[in-house]
Amino acid sequence: MNKKLHVGNLPSGVTDQDLLEKFARFGVVDFAAVVKDALSGESRGFGLVEMGDPASAQEAIKWLNFSSYEGQIMAVTLFERGNSSH
Protein backbone atom coordinates (compact mmCIF):
# COMPACT_ATOMS: atom_id res chain seq x y z
CA MET A 1 0.00 0.00 0.00
CA ASN A 2 1.12 3.51 -0.76
CA LYS A 3 2.10 5.53 2.33
CA LYS A 4 1.59 8.91 0.63
CA LEU A 5 -1.66 10.69 1.36
CA HIS A 6 -3.50 13.54 -0.33
CA VAL A 7 -5.32 15.78 2.15
CA GLY A 8 -7.98 17.92 0.53
CA ASN A 9 -10.26 20.74 1.62
CA LEU A 10 -7.86 22.20 4.18
CA PRO A 11 -8.70 25.50 5.87
CA SER A 12 -6.60 28.37 4.47
CA GLY A 13 -4.65 28.99 7.70
CA VAL A 14 -3.30 25.43 8.10
CA THR A 15 0.51 25.22 8.13
CA ASP A 16 2.91 22.37 7.40
CA GLN A 17 3.42 21.97 11.15
CA ASP A 18 -0.35 21.82 11.77
CA LEU A 19 -0.66 19.08 9.17
CA LEU A 20 2.24 17.14 10.66
CA GLU A 21 0.74 17.33 14.15
CA LYS A 22 -2.70 16.25 12.90
CA PHE A 23 -1.27 13.06 11.38
CA ALA A 24 1.48 12.30 13.94
CA ARG A 25 -1.00 10.84 16.39
CA PHE A 26 -1.39 7.90 13.97
CA GLY A 27 2.31 7.18 13.53
CA VAL A 28 5.58 8.52 12.21
CA VAL A 29 5.15 11.32 9.66
CA ASP A 30 8.08 11.46 7.24
CA PHE A 31 6.79 14.49 5.35
CA ALA A 32 3.89 16.93 5.60
CA ALA A 33 3.33 20.00 3.44
CA VAL A 34 0.50 22.31 2.53
CA VAL A 35 0.66 23.02 -1.20
CA LYS A 36 0.96 26.74 -1.89
CA ASP A 37 0.39 28.86 -4.96
CA ALA A 38 3.73 29.71 -6.56
CA LEU A 39 2.86 33.37 -7.11
CA SER A 40 0.82 34.37 -4.08
CA GLY A 41 2.25 31.92 -1.53
CA GLU A 42 -1.28 31.20 -0.30
CA SER A 43 -2.55 27.70 0.41
CA ARG A 44 -4.19 25.91 -2.50
CA GLY A 45 -6.43 24.09 -0.02
CA PHE A 46 -4.70 20.73 -0.02
CA GLY A 47 -1.60 19.06 1.29
CA LEU A 48 0.54 15.95 1.05
CA VAL A 49 1.56 13.67 3.91
CA GLU A 50 3.88 10.68 3.91
CA MET A 51 3.50 8.26 6.79
CA GLY A 52 6.18 6.00 8.26
CA ASP A 53 4.34 2.76 7.45
CA PRO A 54 1.26 1.52 5.59
CA ALA A 55 -0.67 0.65 8.76
CA SER A 56 -0.25 4.21 10.07
CA ALA A 57 -1.41 5.64 6.76
CA GLN A 58 -4.47 3.41 6.72
CA GLU A 59 -5.34 4.36 10.30
CA ALA A 60 -5.03 8.08 9.45
CA ILE A 61 -7.35 7.65 6.47
CA LYS A 62 -9.84 5.73 8.61
CA TRP A 63 -10.07 8.45 11.27
CA LEU A 64 -9.41 11.67 9.35
CA ASN A 65 -11.21 11.19 6.03
CA PHE A 66 -14.49 13.14 6.20
CA SER A 67 -13.56 14.59 9.59
CA SER A 68 -14.02 18.24 10.49
CA TYR A 69 -10.96 20.50 10.65
CA GLU A 70 -11.65 24.10 11.64
CA GLY A 71 -15.17 23.81 10.22
CA GLN A 72 -14.20 22.17 6.92
CA ILE A 73 -14.60 18.51 6.05
CA MET A 74 -11.25 17.02 5.05
CA ALA A 75 -10.82 14.42 2.32
CA VAL A 76 -7.90 12.08 3.05
CA THR A 77 -7.03 9.58 0.33
CA LEU A 78 -4.06 7.67 -1.00
CA PHE A 79 -1.90 9.80 -3.27
CA GLU A 80 -1.52 8.19 -6.68
CA ARG A 81 0.75 10.12 -9.01
CA GLY A 82 0.12 9.78 -12.71
CA ASN A 83 -3.07 7.78 -12.36
CA SER A 84 -5.23 10.34 -14.14
CA SER A 85 -7.87 9.24 -16.63
CA HIS A 86 -7.64 12.55 -18.55
Image (spheres, rainbow, N blue to C red):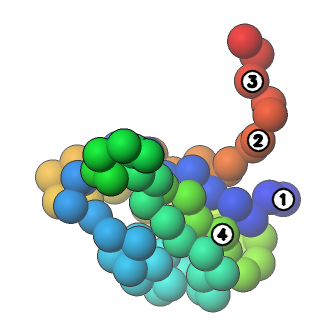
Quadrant containing the N terminus is: bottom right
**Residue 58 vs residue 9: left or right?**
right
Q: Which numbered circle lies on residue 50?
A: 4
Which of the two discs, 1 and 4, sits closer to the camera?
4
Numbered label attached to residue 84 = 3
Residue 73 showing in the rendered view: no
Name which residue type carries label 1.
Answer: Met
- Furthest toward the front, the residue is 39
- How far is mark 2 from mark 3, CA to CA? 8 Å
Q: Amino acid at mark 2?
A: Arg
Q: Secondary structure at mark 2?
A: loop
Three-letter code for the amino acid on which mark 3 is drawn: Ser
In percent of the image, x 76 and y 78: which residue is there? 53
Nearest the eye: 60 or 16: 16
In the picture of the structure, the residue carrying the numbered disc 2 is: 81
Residue tagged 1: 1
Lateral position of residue 83 relative to residue 68, left or right: right
- 3 on left or right of 71: right
Q: Select label 3 or label 1 by which is in front.
A: 3
Rendered location of residue 83, percent (x, y): 79, 30
What residue is drawn where x is 23% and y is 52%?
12
Tell me how far mark 3 sits from mark 1, CA to CA.
18 Å
> In the structure shown, which secondary structural element does the residue marked by tag 3 occupy?
loop
**CB atoms at circles 1 and 4 under 8 Å apart?**
no
Image coords of residue 58 (percent x, y): 66, 64
Q: Residue at x 50, y 84 (%)?
A: 24
Q: Amino acid at mark 4?
A: Glu
User: Count of labels shown?
Assistant: 4
Q: Please identify the quadrant where the C terminus is shown.
A: top right
Circle 3/circle 1 CB separation < 8 Å: no
Instruction: Examine the rendered structure and indicate whether residue 72 appears above or below residue 48.
Output: above
How many C-alpha atoms fall within 10 Å of the one at disc 2: few (<14), some, or many (≥20)?
few
